[in-house]
Amino acid sequence: MNPGIRRALTLLLLLWLGGTFAELTLFGHWEDPVQLIPLGVVPAAVASLIALSLRPGTATRRAFQLAMCLLVATGAAGVALHYRANLEFQREVDPGAAQWLLMSKALHAKAPPALAPASLTLIGSFGLVLAQGHLNDGRTRGR
């Protein structure tokens, strides 16, 4: 991968992670212990990205890939948790509603936003693509 493109993508990922952490913090995403998970995974991803940038190699690339996989898993779990919480709320509000209507309302709810955690999945996927670029660099340069 072109070093300039890699630096630009790394900076973009760093900004994306920083913005996500700021958003989680500003919205007080710590009401229960499960909500602390992304507040731990995102800084770990930042640390692994910085380590990979400063010391590219097999160990730092693998640590970065692990952090990105954790982001993907955290995002998927977050979508499931947000959706489930919204669905339970909608069932309490309208217990006789049809399943399709409940599902629709759960997906469109603003608090918690059901699909917001999917951004972590996208960030992790983006990071895995970036890690592949580092892997390809290692192969072409003999690392």
Image: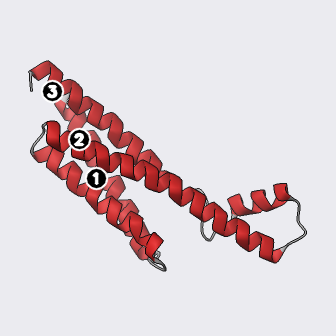
Q: Nearer the viewer, residue 80 or 108?
A: 80
x and y percentages locating residue 58 in the rendered image? 15, 36
User: Neighbour class for label 1 at 10 Å: few (<14), some, many (≥20)?
Assistant: some
Using the numbered discs, state the Cα–Cα distance from disc 2 to disc 1 in whole angstroms. 18 Å
Rendered position, 13 above or below 98 = above
Q: Is residue 18 left or right of residue 35?
A: left
Rendered position, 35 above or below 136 = below
Q: Quadrant of the N terminus?
A: top left
Task: Check disc 2 and report its element: helix, strand or loop.
Answer: helix
Using the numbered discs, state the Cα–Cα distance from disc 1 to disc 3 in whole angstroms. 22 Å
In this rendering, which labeled residue sits more in front, label 1 or label 3?
3
Q: Residue at x 33, y 66 (%)?
A: 40
Q: Which residue is mark 2?
A: 62
x and y percentages locating residue 17 in the rendered image? 34, 56
Mark linked to residue 138: 3
Q: Are marks 2 and 1 in contact (CB under 8 Å)?
A: no
Q: Are marks 1 and 3 in contact (CB under 8 Å)?
A: no
Q: Which residue is mark 1?
A: 14
Using the numbered discs, state the Cα–Cα distance from disc 3 to disc 2 in whole angstroms. 13 Å
User: Neighbour class for label 2 at 10 Å: few (<14), some, many (≥20)?
Assistant: some
Task: Check disc 1 and report its element: helix, strand or loop.
Answer: helix
Q: Is residue 59 left or right of residue 26?
A: left
Q: Quadrant of the C terminus?
A: top left
User: Which amino acid, mark 2?
Assistant: Arg
Quarter of the image where one finds residue 96:
bottom right
Q: Is residue 20 left or right of residue 81?
A: left
Q: Earlier in the sequence, mark 3 or mark 2?
A: 2
User: Which amino acid, mark 3?
Assistant: Gly
Quarter of the image where one finds residue 45:
bottom left
Q: How many marks?
A: 3
Residue 35 visible in image: yes
In this rendering, which labeled residue sits more in front, label 3 or label 2?
2
